[in-house]
Image (cartoon, rainbow, N blue to C red):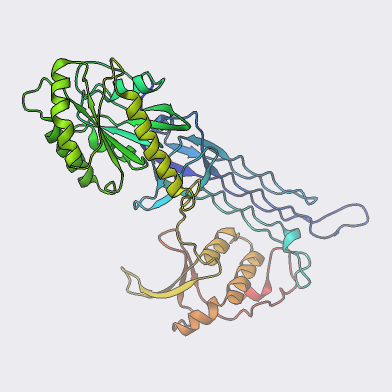
Amino acid sequence: MTTFVDRVDLHATAGDGGHGCASVHREKFKPLGGPDGGNGGRGGNVVLVVDPSVTTLIGFHHRPHQRATNGRPGQGAHRSGADGDDVILPVPDGTVVLGADGETLADLTGSGTTYVVARGGRGGLGNAALASQRRKAPGFALKGEPGEHRDVVLELKSVADVALVGYPSAGKSSLIAALSQARPKIADYPFTTLVPNLGVVTAGDVTYTIADVPGLIPGASEGRGLGLEFLRHIERCSVIVHVIDAASLESDREPLADLDVIEAELAAYGGLADRPRLVALNKVDLPDGRLVADMVAPLLAERGLPAFEVSAVSHEGLRELSFAMAALVKEHRVATAEVTPARIIITPPAVDDAGFDVRRETHPETGETIYRVTGMRPERWVLQTDFANEEAVGYLADRLARLGVEERLLAEGAAPGSTVVIGPGDGAVVFDWEPTIAAGGTAASGPRGTDRRLEDW
């Protein structure tokens, strides 16, 4: 039996970019034919794709860690490395992607909708791509960037037009089976339904889906019973239908009180006050059910709630109910057709790719003043640098100076010998800063991979 899972943690790791290649073309009579190192390949992405055939998130429950492959390194003769393979993860329609802080990153609705949850690292440039008029034969290449790692939460909210709500054993599953071709589990004990059931109904020219939300009880919005676990499946529905057991054998149950309890739980959950309501007084095929339904229907009409006396067994009243639901669904679709896009993608605020920040900090142990540089570009450039190669370090210094980092450090009060840290946390790179290298300076001649500007740095 397939287990229904509608909330999982996903740990996605994209592939690392391949390193660029430092190579010089050599052939007979051309011992130094110029740089010909190729670029590294891009790391693979981790991508979520809506697949209508997938109805549960159970695959991620068993395999929460997903990793894409790395890009291949570049080679000589201008051969670029192969890109890493993307990992394509099928998810159900209605999957919401949440960040670690609960922020909504993406709302995936509609077949084929995609979201890159972790982006692969860029491949490093080979020395052929780094050549310029001032640096004709670079003796270094850039390293590939690490792939992005993200911990997210996937939450499924059923995409249905009508939500059937009510106490356990009110007959919601029986109504779905009678109205559609769905065949949910039906039994005569509470909490028979442990997962939301979906059915497709056609009434006239309107085809819509109905969802049976597992039984709500008092305190469901606070975690009692199964209600809190499945209340999120009501959020996307445009119509709410209260299914009331008009022939309940429980002495402490009364139809209007049942309705008030469920409404209180929906109000406590929040965000559902604007949905139109219908009431289905079920089990009128039984004598007691017919008597109670006839008594309650006028009272519901006084509240402005259309009531339908129905029976999932004899199918009495189901045609009227299905057309009433279809009318409300059609009205909602017309009202939202121009303002609601077919799919909704929400992305976090973009980070300025050219930005960086310099701030003074005090070392917690030594009390020393340090200057921390953060920003997308400086942090990426540090990751791309081979610190065993002096020429590569000089190239990094040129890039930072052109970006304006040296000017900001001077403005913040940094002096020669000050400790400069690039990047956040413990993985940052630490320098003893010496502002003596002019941006765009030409490397002095010397052995390949060296830069004489750095001899006194």
Q: Residue at x 82, y 60 (%)?
A: 34
Quick check: can you spot residue 319?
Answer: yes
Q: Where is residue 6 shown, x and y percent of the image?
A: 36, 34
Is residue 131 positioned above or below 215 on the image?
Answer: below
Is residue 354 positioned above or below 306 on the image?
Answer: below
In which quadrant of the rendered view does residue 174 lie?
A: top left
Quick check: can you spot residue 5?
Answer: no
In which quadrant of the rendered view does residue 353 lie?
A: bottom right
Quadrant in the picture for the N terminus: top left
Is residue 364 positioned above or below 21 on the image?
Answer: below
Quadrant in the picture for the C terminus: bottom right
Is residue 402 positioned above or below 147 on the image?
Answer: below
In which quadrant of the rendered view does residue 84 lie?
A: top right
Residue extending farthest to the left is 251
Q: Where is residue 54 shown, x and y percent of the image?
A: 47, 30
Query: What is the count of numbered marks?
Result: 0
Choose between 244 and 150: the one closer to the eye: 244
Whether residue 246 sits left or right of residue 55 in the image: it is left
Q: Where is residue 407 shown, x and y percent of the image?
A: 53, 82
Q: Where is residue 5 shown, x and y percent of the image?
A: 36, 31
Choose between 376 and 284: the one closer to the eye: 284
Choose between 226 and 271: the one closer to the eye: 271
Residue extending farthest to the right is 29
Whether residue 445 sits left or right of residue 116 in the image: it is right
Q: Residue at x 49, y 44 (%)?
A: 13
Q: Residue at x 13, y 34 (%)?
A: 256
